[in-house]
Image: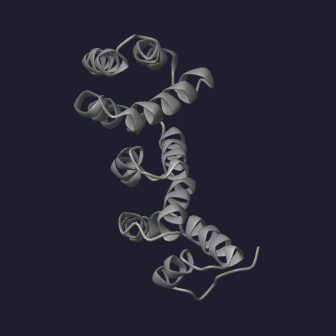
Amino acid sequence: MQENSGKSIEQLISDLGSDDGMVRQRARYALTQLGEPAVDALIRAFQEKNNPTHYEAAKTLSGIGSTKAIATFINALQDEDFSVRWVAAEGLISIGEPSIRPLLRAMELHAESGRLREGVHHVLHDWITRKLIDEQMRKILSPILDAYRNFEPAAATRLAAIEASNQL
């Protein structure tokens, strides 16, 4: 991978919007390597919703895995673009337990959102089935996954999220 040494964070973020896929890939790699110092600028770039910068910023944030991106990822679970929703879920998965309380709160407030429920299902399923969280947390969160099988998943997942929050 070619180095982007000498480029500022702003220049690299600008490169995320390039028509050239290799330029975007190199910028994403360089920003991921920079890590935490690039997070705030990436969150701002993501929120502007300029394609392809919107997706590339989400993918880069996911690669960094900063807890500062939790709220951005949770909001992105309702994005119009499925690939952005997927990358946001993957970002929450990689962040792990610090994401649990904010994710449960989002479910309590917005369980009627099918996109949010789909994203939360993705996150919880991976955390639980891949054992990415401890056993106690898996026991607390498993009823939320079970609630997806309910006839009224919005109400059932909201109640399960509230119950899980109360157990934390």
What residue lies at 56% left-to-right and 86% top-to-bottom? Answer: 7
Q: How many marks?
A: 0
Q: Is residue 134 left or right of residue 3?
A: left
User: For residue 112, what is the image quadrant?
Assistant: top left
Question: Where 22 falls versus 92 (above or below)?
Answer: below
Question: Where 69 falls versus 7 (above or below)?
Answer: above
Q: Quadrant of the N terminus?
A: bottom right
What residue lies at 54% left-to-right and 45% top-to-bottom? Answer: 86
What residue lies at 54% left-to-right and 79% top-to-bottom? Answer: 12
Q: Which sits in the foreground, 81 or 66?
A: 81
What residue lies at 49% left-to-right and 58% top-to-bottom? Answer: 58
Q: Is residue 110 left or right of residue 97?
A: left
Colour mode of the rendering: one colour
User: For residue 109, what is the image quadrant?
Assistant: top left
Q: Which sits in the foreground, 99 or 149?
A: 149
Question: Where 144 falls versus 45 (above or below)?
Answer: above
The location of residue 37, given as percent across then percent down, is 44, 69
The location of residue 39, given as percent across then percent down, is 43, 64
The location of residue 134, given as percent across then percent down, is 51, 22
Q: Which sits in the foreground, 6 or 86?
A: 86
